């Protein structure tokens, strides 16, 4: 049975996934007023300001031995966020989030290759079912832009590395706001390449940018908190809930389409989430050694 700390960690991850879904919808709306790069750069700027304020008030610090984890988390995280935000602007929140959230595959692969993190049979099965569901939704015949799909997949690959560093930095006790400040600072130079707004986004546009920046900050803090007690390979599967919720929000509010294949894919994603929530088995390598 899962321990109370593990349950709190999983609850924090589900809360983060829900917030990320809402942020994705705001990104889509904001992208109708600003370029995807400008929306992404604004998120970094708002995140950096809020994180800096919280860190200054709380006098939070990062230890020298954790600096490498923080920097690598920042680099991979910033690149992943940029790619995903551009993808949302080119396609839609549901489709882009679905493709970018195939990153649990890369979390497990990179965790095994570079960090010696063992995978359980249950987690592997959960990823397989969720990925099959994601593939069905992706091939729904919507005719979305290939460029958006490629940006989303690039974001997924980069996120696979970023999540491993989030997990390790969180386990080492790095403050979640310090941890999120890193990708925000790495992302600030994006303003040099982002097309400036061609016109005023109005009050609604400004509120959307604030919602994106503030919502992402809170979601990142919850994610870092959750990964303190939940392994990266297992916790990352929780974010298929973000995919399912974002798709539903896109259908309701962003004009995205749904067909039978779409619905079946979402059902598979939910089944995969249920599998991942069940009590964990022994790691694969340990289980195999008992034969």
Image: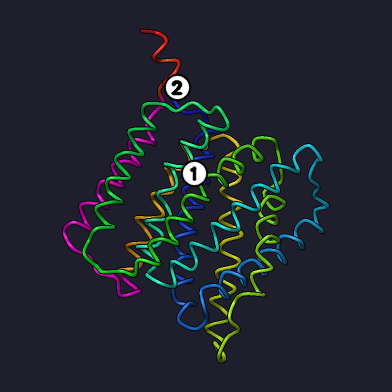
Number of numbered markers:
2
254 to the left or right of 16: left
- Quarter of the image for residue 171 reads top right
Question: Farthest residue toward the top?
Answer: 291
Residue assigned mark 1: 11
- Which residue occupies 25% across, 49% down? 267
Say which quadrant the C terminus sits in.
Answer: top left
Question: Farthest residue toward the left?
Answer: 260
For the residues labelled 2 and 1, the Cα–Cα distance comes to 22 Å
Depth check: 158 or 47 in front? 158
Which labelled disc corresponds to residue 2? none
* Label 2 residue SS: loop
- Which residue occupies 59% across, 53% down? 77
75 to the left or right of 266: right
* Label 1 residue SS: helix
Tell which tag, 2 or 1, sits nearer the viewer: 2
Question: Is 200 in the magenta?
Answer: no
Give the image location of residue 188, x and y in percent. Answer: 68, 67
260 to the left or right of 242: left
Give the image location of residue 128, x and y in percent. Answer: 32, 38
Residue assigned mark 2: 283
- Which residue occupies 35% across, 74% down? 254
- Which residue occupies 39% across, 32% down? 123
- Quarter of the image for residue 215 reads bottom right
Question: Is 272 in the magenta?
Answer: yes
Few, some or many residues within 10 Å of mark 2 (<14, 14–19, 20+): some
Range of residues picked out in magenta:
252-280
242 to the left or right of 196: left
């Amino acid at each position: 049975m899962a321990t109370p700390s593990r349950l709190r960690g999983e609850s924090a991850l589900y809360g983060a996934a829900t917030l990320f879904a809402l942020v994705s919808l705001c990104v889509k709306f904001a992208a109708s007023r600003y370029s995807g790069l400008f929306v992404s750069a604004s998120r970094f700027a708002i995140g950096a300001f809020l994180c800096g304020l919280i860190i200054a008030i709380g006098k939070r610090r990062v230890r020298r031995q954790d600096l490498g984890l923080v920097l690598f988390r920042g680099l991979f995280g910033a690149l992943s966020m940029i790619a995903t935000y551009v993808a949302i602007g080119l396609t839609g929140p549901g489709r882009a989030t679905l493709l970018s959230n195939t990153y649990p595959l890369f979390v497990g692969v990179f965790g095994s290759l570079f960090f010696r993190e063992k995978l359980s049979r249950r987690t592997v099965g959960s990823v397989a079912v969720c990925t099959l569901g994601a593939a069905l939704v992706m091939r729904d015949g919507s005719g979305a832009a290939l460029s958006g799909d490629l940006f989303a997949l690039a974001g997924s690959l980069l996120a696979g590395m970023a999540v491993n560093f989030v997990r390790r930095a969180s386990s080492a006790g790095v403050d979640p706001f310090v941890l999120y400040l890193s990708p925000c600072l790495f992302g600030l130079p994006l303003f040099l390449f982002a097309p400036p707004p061609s016109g005023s986004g109005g009050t609604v546009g400004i509120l959307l940018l604030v919602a994106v920046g503030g919502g992402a900050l809170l979601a990142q803090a919850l994610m870092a908190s959750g990964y303190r007690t939940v392994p990266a390979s297992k916790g990352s599967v929780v974010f298929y809930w973000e995919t399912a919720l974002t798709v539903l929000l896109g259908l309701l509010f962003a004009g995205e389409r749904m067909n039978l294949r779409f619905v079946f894919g979402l059902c598979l994603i939910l089944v995969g989430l249920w599998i991942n929530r069940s009590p964990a088995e022994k790691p694969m390598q340990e289980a195999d050694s008992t034969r």
